[in-house]
Amino acid sequence: MNQQYQICTRCVMDTSDENIKFDANGVCDHCHDFDNYVTPNWHTDEQGRQELERLIAKIKKSGKGKDFDCLLGISGGVDSSYMLHMAVKEFGLRPLVFHVDGGWNSELSVHNINVMIDKLGLDLYTEVINWEEMKDFQLAFFKSGVPHLDIPQDHAFIATLYQFADKYKINYILNGGNISTECVQYPMKYYYYGTDMKQIRDIRKKFGISKMETYPFSSIFRHRIYLKYFRGVNVVRPLNYMPFIKEDALSLLEEEYGWKRYPQKHFESRFTKFFEGYWLPERFGFDPRRVQLSSLILTGQMVRDEALENLKKPAYNPDTIDEDFHYIATKLGISPKELRLYFNLPKKYYWDYKNQQNIFRVGARVLRWLGVEKVKKRDK
């Protein structure tokens, strides 16, 4: 990193995001994007309530005569769990609830999914990804040297979600994603698009072995164009139309369902916990907590001093990291020594492999122009 270290005076984003820009007062462009692009288009007041009521009415109408009126994927994390609670208890919807088991569920995530399903009296549809294929896919990404190691997991979740919607003729997918806790964007350098099939094919061709005969691939064209405009499958984020305070949601889930908290966002997956808690900060020098905490600061759910205090401690537990390293390696069928070799590989990024970044960039700008995207996407 050539630039002098600097941290935003309003949030906690810093120069570990190498494309960050600061104004004369030391406020970063993430904060300005929030003020200029997010706030004017984000309505959680009466306008949002009315929009939400219209959306729920459309969902119920589309589901008349069907077993389900919407689809909701649950990971066991706070966002999808709270979304499920709201969908059933507050909105009166009939979701098909499904979970994708990519082989990395933590005991805590299994507990949280089960208590939600049991208390709400729902059925859970589970899709188990072929482990040999998932393992080979993940090892290919380790061998490629890139930071975005979560793509094999994330792509399976997204592709399976759309497959279920298509199979059961469901027009609405409920997504727990929300501006309230996710208004700051991850730098693309570390979190590249998970549905860039050109890049996925290139990395698999160079480093993969498996033929991937059952893994659920889905291109951006299939789910953003064909399924949306020809099949009428819509992804909606109801939490964006209402006040969503993370701490209140956590308390409700704990009290009503016996749901249990994770140490950090996305830690419902043991792989993501290792990737975001250790691999990304230690190998690439980027701590995802900066994005997560900055989102809470900008939406008034955390003060900056508290976030800075949190960042003083590593996201991983130094006392158990060797054990975690051994667990990840063993599950992937390699030795901890081999995993350490991947950790020390020359660093590569999405631009070092074939990609479709320009297509994604243009698409994001069109969606923002149409008013579909409320959060400005960073294209670097």
Image: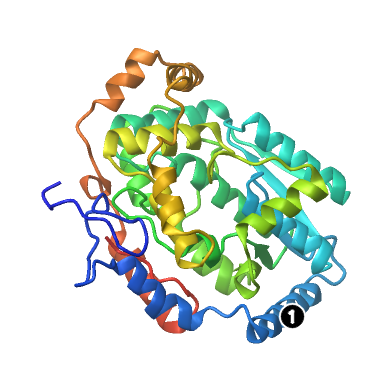
Q: How many marks?
A: 1
Left or right of residue 85, residue 232 in this image: left
| 129 w.r.t. 197: above or below | above
* Residue 93 quadrant: bottom right
Estimate the x, y position of residue 25 in percent, counting from the top left.
23, 71
| 284 w.r.t. 159: above or below | above
Left or right of residue 56, residue 345 in this image: left
Looking at the rendered structure, the kind of residue marked 1 is Glu
Describe the colour scheme in one phrase. Answer: rainbow
Q: Where is the C terminus found, in terms of image quarters?
A: bottom left
Estimate the x, y position of residue 101 in percent, counting from the top left.
63, 36
Under circle 1, the secondary element is helix
Q: Residue at x 30, y 25 (%)?
A: 342
Q: In the depicted view, which residue is nearer to us: 89 or 248?
A: 248
Residue under pointer 1: 53
Mark 1 nearby-residue class (10 Å; few <14, some 14–19, many ≥20) = some
Q: Is residue 41 visible?
A: yes
Q: Residue at x 35, y 38 (%)?
A: 280
Estimate the x, y position of residue 325 in percent, counting from the top left.
43, 20
| 351 w.r.t. 221: above or below | above
Q: In the depicted view, which residue is nearer to us: 206 or 350?
A: 350
Estimate the x, y position of residue 211 in percent, counting from the top left.
45, 32
* Residue 242 quadrant: bottom right
Q: Residue at x 28, y 20 (%)?
A: 341
Q: In the depicted view, which residue is nearer to us: 333 or 316?
A: 316
| 53 w.r.t. 347: above or below | below
Q: Residue at x 47, y 83 (%)?
A: 40
